[in-house]
Amino acid sequence: MSGTSRDGIDAALIRSDGTGHVEPLAFLHHGYDEDFRSRLAAGCDAALALPVPAAHPLIDAVTAELTARHAMIITDLIDTAGLSAKDIHVVGFHGHTVAHRPDRRWTWQIGDGAALATALGITVVHDFRSGDVAAGGQGAPLIPIYHGAMTAGLGRPVALLNLGGVANITAIGEDEAMAAFDCGMANALIDDWVQQHFGQPYDDGGRIAAAGTVDEAVLQAMLDHPYFMAPAPKSLDRADFSNGPVAHLTPHDGAATLTAFSAMGVAKACALLAQPPRQILVAGGGRHNPVLLEMIARFCRAEVHDVDRFGWNGDATEAEGFAYMALRRLRGLPISFPGTTGVPVPMTGGIINQP
Ligand SMILES: Nc1ncnc2c1ncn2[C@@H]1O[C@H](COP(=O)(O)OP(=O)(O)OP(=O)(O)O)[C@@H](O)[C@H]1O
Ligand SMILES: [Mg+2]
């Protein structure tokens, strides 16, 4: 998984049947260097400017490099676990979202599934989202089916929040019905802001935001956006919001206001759910930001808990989820649903590449 934060690649090894049994075995993270991070950002800008996904020299070069980097981390992961390629049934290769345009009926995750399968000598499932979007779904979020498996023993109703570049929430009711959608930004704008003003990749521990003051007028203006009131299904590209509205604030106040903007997005999402959750389990890198978590708890009037408290590694959730979805693809089981992506009927997703 190479997430919208562009922080690096997460690789997870699980043992699973693609349904109720999931056992995490190993996890690795390779961070991107500043150089690759900016090539990836340039690839995203180039992709968003295209009317449809198409060959493009910069994007093609980034795709090849991204694929090679995935081959490296997967090889390391298999080594770490003391296994070899023949022990691995399938690799789920999410790739990197360079542009997400369900309004134009396309979404684009770069990553060469066939090349990865050949490099590893393992079956690879990639391109998980395009089929859903072509069928009229949002193509996101896909992780809810894995959230369901993770929380199988925890009782219902339950709500899970992923704080990646973008935030998405999954609510699972007593009847197992899933409601899930992107809430708003999580880390993407905060990361961009602290990179620009402090030369840091993220606001470590939320310390920069903690030293600033939320500008209520700017926050309200940012929240006055039709996305927050729109009913689900709905999903976001990281470029759907910008930090233009905070540009005139001090660097610390800007960070505080962007952090509040992410937290209020979650509160607005909770208000759209049939039953606002009293307890929210959080995964993703944003859960390392206590200022963000405190605001979410306060704005949502809910208890907020790390999924780690329930025995999971919240840094590994997305990567584990795509391994799980690859297994489901091989078994022809659905990964997206009317209540998650808004696809008309439950459907499986992903393209299978044999080595
Ligand atoms: N110690 C920390 N303090 C504050 N923020 C952190 C810390 N560690 C990680 N983060 C945030 O988490 C982000 C990475 O989170 P994650 O990998 O879940 O996001 P992602 O790659 O965008 O995934 P997704 O696909 O869900 O969008 C970083 O970019 C950073 O903003
Ligand atoms: Mg990441």
Image (tube, rainbow, N blue to C red):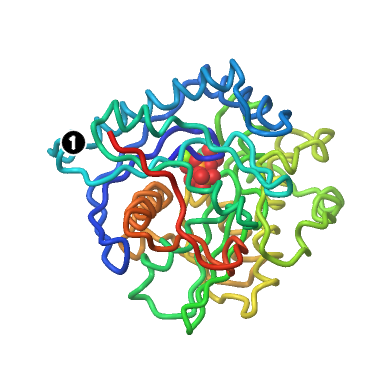
Query: Circle 1 sits in a helix, a strand or a loop, which is it?
Result: helix
Residue 121, quarter of the rendered image = top left
* Residue at image coords 57%, 62%: 169
Q: Between residue 210 and residue 266, name the one nearer to us.
A: 266
Look at 70% across and 72% down and name the residue there.
271
**Picture residue at 37% right of the left edge, 60% below the top:** 332
Residue found at the far bottom of this picture: 174
Estimate the x, y position of residue 150 in percent, counting from the top left. 36, 65
Q: Nearer the viewer, residue 242 or 42?
A: 42
Location of residue 155 by image quarter:
bottom left
Q: Is residue 135 left or right of residue 24?
A: right
Left or right for 310, reference 201: left
Residue on which disc 1 sits: 85
Q: In which quadrant will I find the C terminus? A: top left
Q: Residue at x 63, y 46 (%)?
A: 210
Q: Is residue 8 above or below residue 132?
A: above
Q: Is residue 66 above or below residue 210?
A: above
* Residues packed near mark 1 inside 10 Å, few (<14), some (14 to 19) or many (20 plus): some
Name the quarter where the N terminus is drawn.
top left
- Residue 9 visible: yes
- From the viewer's side, name the closer residue of 1 and 105: 105
Q: Is residue 179 above or below residue 163?
A: below
Amino acid type, residue under disc 1 in the picture: Ala
Please provide percent x and percent y for residue 49. 73, 28
Count of marks placed on residues: 1
Judge whether residue 204 can be spotted in this image: no
Residues 284 and 194: in front is 284
Q: Position of residue 89 (x, y in %)?
A: 23, 46
Q: Does the beta carbon of the residue at mark 1 sit less than 8 Å from ligand 2?
A: no
